[in-house]
Each structure stands twice: as C-alpha cells, then as structure tokens.
Amino acid sequence: MQSSEQTPYYITTAISYPNGRPHIGHAYEVIATDAMARFKRLDGYDVWFLTGTDEHGQKMQQTADKEGIDVRDLAERNAQVFKDMQSALNISLDRFIRTTDEDHIRAAQAIWERMEEAGDIYLDAYAGWYSVRDEAYYGADETEVREDGQRYATQSGTPVEWTEEQTYFFRLSEYRERLLALYEENPSFIGPAQRHNEVSSFVRGDLRDLSISRTTFDWGVPVPGHPEHVMYVWVDALTNYLTGVGFPETESESYKTYWPADLHVIGKDIARFHAVYWPAFLMSAGLPLPKRVYAHGFLFNKGEKMSKSVGNVVDPFSLVDTYGLDQLRYFLLREVPFGQDGSYSHDGIVGRMNADLANDLGNLAQRSLSMVAKNCNGQVPEPGTFAEADAALLAKAGTLLEKCRADFEVQDFHRALESIWTVIAETNRYFSAQEPWVLRKTDPERMNTVLYATLEVLRVAAILVQPVMPESMAKLLTVLGQNDDARTYAVLGASIVPGTELPKPTPIFPRYEEPAE
RNA sequence: GGGGCAGUAGUUCAGCUGGUUAGAACACCGGACUCAUAAUCCGUAUGUCGUGGGUUCAAGCCCCACCUGCCCUACCA
C-alpha cells in the first residue's frame, strides 16, 4: 500500500484481565481508543491499533481452580468474550494481543534480558503480608486482624497471608532523576494534566525498587535462565505494547515503523504503572519511550460506583441491544469529558439520542434531503451566488477540521463533538430562517442555494463524525451521494458536487420511545 | 497526617490573570411555522454562585476557617 508515505500512528488500550466478563468500563476505553484510531486514519495516518487480554497471574489461576477447569481453557474462553465485545462495538483494531501468545512470551523474556544486561535486575528476599487479590505485599502496619481471626489489608480489605520468597527486583530507584527530567521536558507525556502532577509528585518522593518476579505460582512468563520464577504482572503486561509491533525483532518493518507508540490509552487506576514503571523499564532496556499516556476517568451508574456486590454492573452487550451501537458510542464520548469520571444513566443516553441525534442531526438531514428529493430531481442542486448567511454558515463548517484535530490531539473528544453540534444547531436555525419551502414558490434558485449549503454542512459534519459513529455516518454519507473515496479528511476542503445523484432519503437516527409497559 | 481537585439554575456543566443586570445545553412553559423523525424556530422563566468571616471602590473568581464528596501520598503507635 502507500503506508510508507503516511505518517505512522501507533495506539493502544490497556489489556484487560479476563477473569470475568467485560463491563462497560472496558467498552468505554476501547470505544474511545477506536474513535482516536479512526480519526487518525481518516486524517491520513498509517495507524496500528492494538488491544487484547492480560491472561497470566494468580487470580486467573484461582478462578480456574474454582471452576475446576484448566487455566488455559479459562483464558481461551474469556479472551473470546472480549474479542466478541470488540466485534459488537465495531472496533477497528489491527491486532488482538494475548499475553499467552507465543511471540509475547519471547518479547517479555527479551526485555527482561535487556534490563538484566543493563545491570538493573537483582535477586533479593521478599517477605511480607501478601494479598493474592491485590497481587501486592503489605507491611504489617497496613494490615489488621479482624474478628474472624483472619488478617486483612486495611486499605483494600482483602485477605493477606504471610509469604516469604526470593524475587527479582528492578532498580527503579535508579531512574528517579531521569523520570523527573522526562516529565519536566515533556509535560504532555501524561494526560490529563492533573495526572501529570500526581505522577511527578509520586516520583519526587521515595522511589523504591520493584519486585518483578514470583515463585509462589507458575502461571506466567518464565524468567530467562530461572524457570522457577515467573514474571510478576508489570514486566509481562506492559511489554505487550512492544510485542504488538514485532519486538524483539527490532529490525522488523513493523517495529521500525510503529515504535515508539504515539498513545497508550489507559484507566486512571493504572496511571502510575504506565507513567513510571513503563518508561523506566524502557530506559533500562535502551528502547525509545512512548510519546503519550492518557489516563481516562471511570464511568458510574447514575453516579454510583459499579460493583458486582451492588449489582449495578452494566453489560456492554445489552446496552448495544437497547440503544444501538453508534448511539452508545456517541453518548460515551459526547457526555463525559474523557479525563474525568462520568455517569451513565438511561435518561442521559435517551436525552442525547433524541436531542442530538434524532432531532438535531437526523432531522436536519431528513428535512433537507426530502426537499431535494421532491424539488431537485433527487440531485444535489446547483447553488447561485452565496449570500452573507450562506457564506457565514459555510465558513463555520470550514473551521471544524482544525478544531477537531486540536481536540482529538489531547483526547478532548466531547469538545470536538460539541463544536460539530454547534454548527449543526446553527444550520437548523439557518434552514428555518431561510424558509426554503417558501422559496420553492417565490425564488427556486435561492431555494437551491439554501439546500446546497445545508447539504454541504451535512457532508462536512458526517465526515468528521465518522470516528465516533462509523456506521451511521456511512449511511448519511451514502444518502448524501458520497462515494467511499470522498469520505476522508483530505476531501473536506472540496465541496459537494452539484448534480450528484442522491438515493431516496431514509431517517438515520430513530427516536427512542420508551417500551410500552 | 501531608498534598490536590470539586461543590454555580430541576439536571449536566461554562465562567480567562477580580469590574456593569452570573452564562450554555437539556428539561419545563408559552408562541410561530409546516420542509422534516410530534421535528424545527422564537421567547419567558429559573439561581442566598457549599457555609461563615476577611481584603477591595468592586469577588463566583483573592485570603482564612469550616462542611461535604473524590483522588494521590504517608503513617506515628
């Protein structure tokens, strides 16, 4: 292809831990990342989009034991559910990576060896109160014995057991200065800005070396030369971003093209691992650092944290069934500023569906296209000279690409959509003010001009909204007579061509009606 | 314990370095129109800007204390 001429853009989500079913939080992250990937593709980049599952670790092993099945079968089964979710959400991924993939195991061992050669790995004793569920050690003061006689981690409330083992450590403490320099020289390395402050203040404090292997279980990547150890979660999991583009073959075409990654999209809970451990690992291994890590917020159910015990966990598959996929994608990206926590509710999504999609955009398309169908032989009309109102409207639409680029660059998806919808609302006002249905009798040429300008704004909006609602916008572009080669950002500067044959218009977005009781 | 963020119309939020009658969207109510998906357009209305002090000619914006929620971080014993 022409990929060599295009600027590469490598984007990832965090990989999911598949010891259960995916919930709306998984869907949220992958939808947002998909929108970003699609935006870049439409803007002419050569995109590589990676997502997948993190299948190792003691929790997977325990879940499998509890179900009485082999851990490999559990991983296989649940990874498939996550893959199914990608399809159900229309995710344009280029590779679904699993940490059990053969090439990933080689990659994890390769980065380990590089870190070891750099002198950053050493063996030491590790002892403490270990929580299997948190996969973390706690000091005695971080635990408490409860009434049942069992000791628990105070903070997380999970049971802990006294554990002693020899584990390998990574000299994280050696990287303090280099990490601080990284944050200072490159403030956009972590987004949003508030995370940047959190992370740098964490590093400014006392950075301790990191335990990176375990001997208490064996479901993981064996440490090279020491197979009684398996890698502890982060060296294994983070390395998936390298595996996804061909590491350890650093001379491979895909590695040379795509590494370092342009953007890691993650949840705010794992910001530290991506903004501190990961760059330190890469520095140690002598590999280039990703350009940006963006930590998004969490989604709450009507303001309440979702949890299995409360029983308010939202299943992404059923949301798609209830509201429609593009409606869900639009809602999540329009309603919630990506870096902040947000709230999901039935009323919220129905409000967006009806107000923004059915009424504003859908109805604008329908009212203009049906006039064109009835009065312009079903072709894009020939405009006359643009009046001031027409030119002003078209000029506003003309600024949208730059605005969207700026907003997507910093993952402000809701701002990009807000700007597009401001122009859509403006177009509805314009349409009502110009009254083309009156012009039909008094000044047909003027009517043609008004309809033309309206269709042109719709074309621009549809092209720009494609990353968020790919299927619906494909439909809209079809009823606007735009072929596949007229849908990228490269053609935004052109105008819709008069005389283009238009199919019979059909509504794009139905209103949501409450089901009858 | 330390640090940070947030608390503004029924709801979700804007309000830049303090400056005339505090804004938007949605919802609500009234009107117009009929091209359109009971849609669109126009208009009215709505607020002790968390609480209490203070600085200032002037504070939602600054200072102090407190309350509430959230986040990061550290713990004396």
Image (spheres, rainbow, N blue to C red):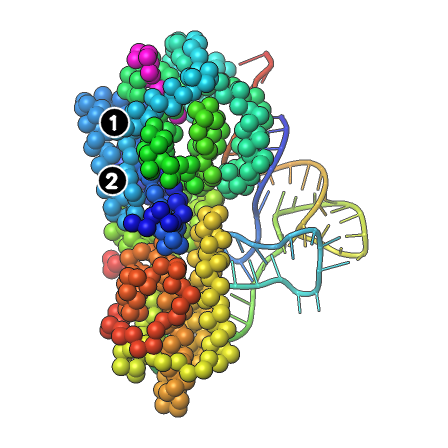
Classify B49 as above or below A127.
below
Tell how many labels: 2
Residue A273 magenta-drawn? no
Instruction: Give the Cα distance between marks 2 and 1.
Output: 18 Å
Q: In the rendered structure, which disc, 2 or 1, sits on the residue that comes first in sequence?
A: 2
In the picture, the disc for residue A46 is: none
Q: Nearer the viewer, mark 2 or mark 1?
A: 1
Chain hosting mark 1 = A
Kind of residue sitting beneath label 1? Glu
Q: Nearer the viewer, residue A45 or A128?
A: A45
Residue shown at 49% from the left, 77% from the top: A389
Residue A310 lies left or right of residue A187; in this view the side is left
Residue A30 lies left or right of residue A75; in this view the side is right
Residue shown at 37% from the left, 49% from the top: A5
User: Which corner quadrant of the image does residue A507 belong to?
Assistant: bottom left
Residue shown at 19% from the left, 23% from the top: A70
User: Which corner quadrant of the image does residue A379 belong to?
Assistant: bottom left
Residue A228 magenta-drawn? yes
Residue where numbered disc 2 is placed: A83
Residue A246 in the image, given as x and y percentages of width and height: 32, 33
Residue A74 in the image, given as x and y percentages of width and height: 22, 28
User: Which corner quadrant of the image does residue A221 belong to?
Assistant: top left
Where disc 2 sits, the SS reads helix
Q: Which residue range is magenta in the image? A: A223-234
Chain hosting mark 2 = A
Residue A9 in the image, given as x and y percentages of width and height: 39, 44
In the picture, the disc for residue A102 is: 1
Q: Quadrant of the C terminus of chain A?
A: bottom left
